Amino acid sequence: MQWILQQFEDTQKLADALDRLDISYSWHKVVPFIGKLMPEPEVRDPHAVVMFGSYTLWRYAEANGFYPGVFRIAPFVHERPWQPFMLNGPDADFLHVSEIEAELPDDGRNWFIRPVADSKELAGSVKTGADIRETARKVMALDAGDIPNGSLRPDTLMMLSPPVRILKEWRIWIVNGVVVTYSLYKEGTRVTYRHEIDQDALVFAQTLAGLNQDYSPAYVMDICRTDEGLRLLETNCINAAGFYSADLLKLAATIDAME
């Protein structure tokens, strides 16, 4: 497998793991707005290339026919096998940014909000209805040509749901339907990265992966513990998700061995 990396703090951690595994890689910068790489990679076999860095690398990977390239994923909220286990899915409302001001009441309630697609226009967070409406107004005041790639747009579909108290949050890396590694990244409101997971949470994550084997060859799943039990928070593109305290040696070796 040929590894193409965009320079970030997390990809440097990945590079350190690749060094220890004696797997070669190359560093590249992404030209803003154009999407080309500097320097242009010398690709030996486009059917054995994987890219890690920003989510926008998927465009370069697809334009050049790289496989696996970047593992794009479908919006997790539409995945029926997972819907009974989602933290926010069952009680969620779905609105395009253009619909928010008309449809979302300014009644003092808080909402958890995030884009439905794994496109990073807005990090999932809890906001008041007033704040969400104000964000939507700012987007709608812009001309379409003035909105940068990767930013909220009028047609961005958002998921809004009632907030839930979360006790712990873990990130899980899944390759070929199997949990490869994991990391705790939050306890209550405190961010903390440790390579650990409760046994029932590990079983829960593997069960979810098994329920939806065709979702993607590789992806990241975030799960959490609430007062009501374990829940699926979201999924993310494995090529652009933070590594926290994952076992990168195991993850890199597993991806490198993919066919």
Image: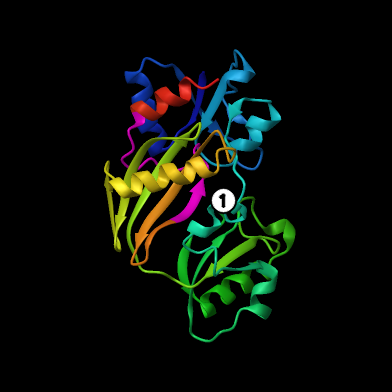
Q: Position of residue 111 (x, y in %)?
A: 49, 73
Q: Position of residue 82 (x, y in %)?
A: 53, 52
Q: Is residue 62 magenta?
A: no
Q: Is residue 236 magenta?
A: yes
Task: State the residue in front, 142 or 166.
Answer: 166
Residue, x 67% and y 32% (percent of image)? 62
Predominant SS along the magenta part: loop
Question: Regarding mark 1 in the picture, which secondary structure is present there?
Answer: helix
Task: State the residue in front, 185 or 198.
Answer: 198
Q: Circle 1 sits on which residue?
A: 81
Tell me which segment is drawn in magenta: 232-248
Residue 65 located left or right of residue 159:
right
Residue, x 48% and y 42% (percent of image)? 209
Q: Does any portion of residue 240 appear in the rendered image?
A: no
Task: State the residue in front, 119 or 216.
Answer: 216
Q: Position of residue 123 (x, y in %)?
A: 49, 58
Which quarter of the image is occupied by the C terminus?
top right
Residue 230 located left or right of residue 110:
left
Residue, x 60% and y 39% (percent of image)? 72
Q: Position of residue 172 (x, y in %)?
A: 40, 43
- For badge 1, the amino acid type reads Pro
Q: Residues within 10 Å of mark 1 (few under 14, many from 20)?
A: some
Residue 97 located left or right of residue 162:
right
Task: State the residue in front, 166 or 30.
Answer: 166
